[in-house]
Image (cartoon, grey):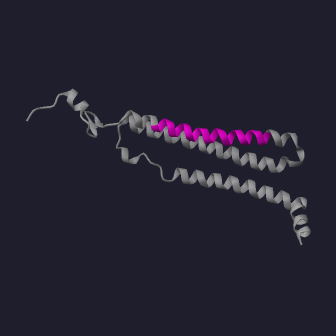
Amino acid sequence: IRAMSCLEKLMDAGTTDLYGVRVEPKVFLANERTFLNWLSMSVSLGSIASVLMTFGRKNAEVAEGVSIVSDSLLITAIAFCIYSSNVFFWRRRGLRRKIDADHYDDPYGPTVLGAILLFALAAIFTSGLVKLVTNGVFVAAISTSR
Protein backbone atom coordinates (compact mmCIF):
# COMPACT_ATOMS: atom_id res chain seq x y z
CA ILE A 1 0.00 0.00 0.00
CA ARG A 2 1.44 3.28 -1.13
CA ALA A 3 1.04 6.30 1.18
CA MET A 4 -0.50 9.36 -0.44
CA SER A 5 1.49 12.55 -0.32
CA CYS A 6 -0.01 15.73 1.11
CA LEU A 7 -0.38 17.13 -2.40
CA GLU A 8 -2.28 14.07 -3.58
CA LYS A 9 -4.59 14.30 -0.58
CA LEU A 10 -5.31 17.95 -1.31
CA MET A 11 -5.92 17.23 -4.98
CA ASP A 12 -8.25 14.36 -4.14
CA ALA A 13 -11.82 15.01 -5.34
CA GLY A 14 -13.33 13.42 -2.22
CA THR A 15 -15.37 15.18 0.40
CA THR A 16 -12.62 15.59 2.98
CA ASP A 17 -9.17 17.12 3.09
CA LEU A 18 -6.36 16.83 5.65
CA TYR A 19 -8.25 18.82 8.27
CA GLY A 20 -11.78 17.41 8.09
CA VAL A 21 -14.72 18.49 5.96
CA ARG A 22 -13.80 20.00 2.62
CA VAL A 23 -15.45 23.36 1.96
CA GLU A 24 -15.60 24.63 -1.61
CA PRO A 25 -15.07 28.37 -2.21
CA LYS A 26 -18.46 28.57 -3.90
CA VAL A 27 -20.09 27.77 -0.55
CA PHE A 28 -18.58 30.92 0.99
CA LEU A 29 -19.80 32.94 -1.98
CA ALA A 30 -23.29 31.43 -1.74
CA ASN A 31 -23.42 32.41 1.92
CA GLU A 32 -22.45 35.99 1.04
CA ARG A 33 -24.94 36.10 -1.84
CA THR A 34 -27.76 34.94 0.43
CA PHE A 35 -26.75 37.53 3.03
CA LEU A 36 -26.81 40.29 0.43
CA ASN A 37 -30.24 39.21 -0.82
CA TRP A 38 -31.67 39.35 2.69
CA LEU A 39 -30.07 42.75 3.25
CA SER A 40 -31.48 43.97 -0.05
CA MET A 41 -34.98 43.05 1.12
CA SER A 42 -34.35 44.77 4.42
CA VAL A 43 -33.12 47.96 2.73
CA SER A 44 -36.15 47.97 0.42
CA LEU A 45 -38.57 47.67 3.33
CA GLY A 46 -36.65 50.29 5.30
CA SER A 47 -36.71 52.69 2.35
CA ILE A 48 -40.46 52.32 1.96
CA ALA A 49 -40.89 52.92 5.70
CA SER A 50 -38.69 56.01 5.51
CA VAL A 51 -40.68 57.48 2.63
CA LEU A 52 -43.93 56.81 4.47
CA MET A 53 -42.60 58.46 7.63
CA THR A 54 -41.66 61.56 5.64
CA PHE A 55 -45.05 61.62 3.91
CA GLY A 56 -46.86 61.20 7.24
CA ARG A 57 -45.09 64.18 8.78
CA LYS A 58 -46.08 66.50 5.93
CA ASN A 59 -49.78 65.55 5.92
CA ALA A 60 -51.31 65.79 9.37
CA GLU A 61 -54.65 64.28 8.31
CA VAL A 62 -53.13 60.92 7.39
CA ALA A 63 -50.33 60.93 9.95
CA GLU A 64 -51.89 58.35 12.27
CA GLY A 65 -52.49 55.67 9.64
CA VAL A 66 -49.19 56.24 7.90
CA SER A 67 -47.39 56.07 11.23
CA ILE A 68 -48.74 52.56 11.87
CA VAL A 69 -47.76 51.43 8.40
CA SER A 70 -44.28 52.92 8.50
CA ASP A 71 -43.56 51.62 12.00
CA SER A 72 -44.61 48.09 11.10
CA LEU A 73 -42.47 48.12 7.94
CA LEU A 74 -39.51 49.56 9.83
CA ILE A 75 -39.73 46.86 12.52
CA THR A 76 -39.95 44.23 9.78
CA ALA A 77 -36.87 45.67 8.02
CA ILE A 78 -34.89 45.63 11.26
CA ALA A 79 -35.94 42.02 11.90
CA PHE A 80 -34.78 41.02 8.40
CA CYS A 81 -31.44 42.76 8.95
CA ILE A 82 -30.81 41.15 12.34
CA TYR A 83 -31.82 37.71 11.07
CA SER A 84 -29.62 37.91 7.97
CA SER A 85 -26.61 39.06 9.98
CA ASN A 86 -27.00 36.28 12.54
CA VAL A 87 -27.40 33.57 9.91
CA PHE A 88 -24.49 34.86 7.82
CA PHE A 89 -22.06 34.92 10.73
CA TRP A 90 -23.33 31.57 12.07
CA ARG A 91 -22.77 29.90 8.68
CA ARG A 92 -19.41 31.63 8.15
CA ARG A 93 -18.17 30.47 11.54
CA GLY A 94 -19.26 26.90 10.72
CA LEU A 95 -17.62 27.00 7.31
CA ARG A 96 -14.34 28.34 8.66
CA ARG A 97 -14.25 25.74 11.39
CA LYS A 98 -15.26 23.10 8.83
CA ILE A 99 -18.14 21.82 10.89
CA ASP A 100 -20.39 19.22 9.26
CA ALA A 101 -22.24 20.91 6.38
CA ASP A 102 -25.57 19.17 7.00
CA HIS A 103 -26.62 21.73 9.60
CA TYR A 104 -26.41 25.06 7.75
CA ASP A 105 -30.09 25.34 6.91
CA ASP A 106 -32.58 27.25 9.02
CA PRO A 107 -36.11 25.88 8.65
CA TYR A 108 -37.72 28.31 11.12
CA GLY A 109 -36.14 31.70 10.40
CA PRO A 110 -37.66 32.42 6.98
CA THR A 111 -41.04 31.21 8.21
CA VAL A 112 -40.93 33.58 11.18
CA LEU A 113 -39.81 36.47 8.95
CA GLY A 114 -42.61 35.69 6.51
CA ALA A 115 -45.07 35.76 9.38
CA ILE A 116 -43.70 39.13 10.54
CA LEU A 117 -44.02 40.50 7.01
CA LEU A 118 -47.54 39.10 6.75
CA PHE A 119 -48.40 40.78 10.06
CA ALA A 120 -47.00 44.10 8.78
CA LEU A 121 -49.01 43.85 5.57
CA ALA A 122 -52.13 42.95 7.58
CA ALA A 123 -51.55 46.06 9.72
CA ILE A 124 -51.29 48.14 6.55
CA PHE A 125 -54.49 46.66 5.13
CA THR A 126 -56.35 47.05 8.42
CA SER A 127 -55.31 50.67 8.88
CA GLY A 128 -56.44 51.45 5.32
CA LEU A 129 -59.74 49.71 5.87
CA VAL A 130 -60.33 51.53 9.16
CA LYS A 131 -59.52 54.83 7.47
CA LEU A 132 -62.07 54.12 4.74
CA VAL A 133 -64.78 53.12 7.21
CA THR A 134 -64.21 56.07 9.58
CA ASN A 135 -64.28 58.60 6.74
CA GLY A 136 -67.55 57.19 5.47
CA VAL A 137 -66.12 56.46 2.02
CA PHE A 138 -66.77 52.75 2.37
CA VAL A 139 -70.31 53.21 3.67
CA ALA A 140 -71.12 55.81 0.98
CA ALA A 141 -69.86 53.49 -1.76
CA ILE A 142 -72.06 50.64 -0.51
CA SER A 143 -75.19 52.83 -0.20
CA THR A 144 -74.79 54.31 -3.71
CA SER A 145 -74.33 50.89 -5.33
CA ARG A 146 -77.84 49.74 -4.25
Asked whether residue 89 is drawn in magenta, I would say no
Image position, residue 22 (x, y; %): 31, 37
Choose top left, top right, bottom left or bottom right for residue 12: top left
- Tell me where residue 82 sits by quadrant: top right
Q: Main secondary structure of the magenta part?
A: helix
On the image, the x and y values in percent for residue 90 come to: 46, 40
Residue at the (46%, 38%) spot, across then down: 30
Instruction: Identify the residue at the far front of this view.
Output: 145
Q: Is residue 7 left or right of residue 42?
A: left
Q: Point out residue 57 in the picture as x, y percentages from the top left corner.
A: 84, 40
Q: Position of residue 91 (x, y in %)?
A: 44, 40
Left or right, 135 with reference to 23: right
Q: Relative to 103, is 96 above or below?
A: above
Residue 79 in the figure: left or right of residue 5: right
Q: Nearer the viewer, residue 58 or 140?
A: 140
- In this orientation, which residue lies closer to the viewer: 13 or 36? 13
Q: Is residue 38 magenta?
A: yes
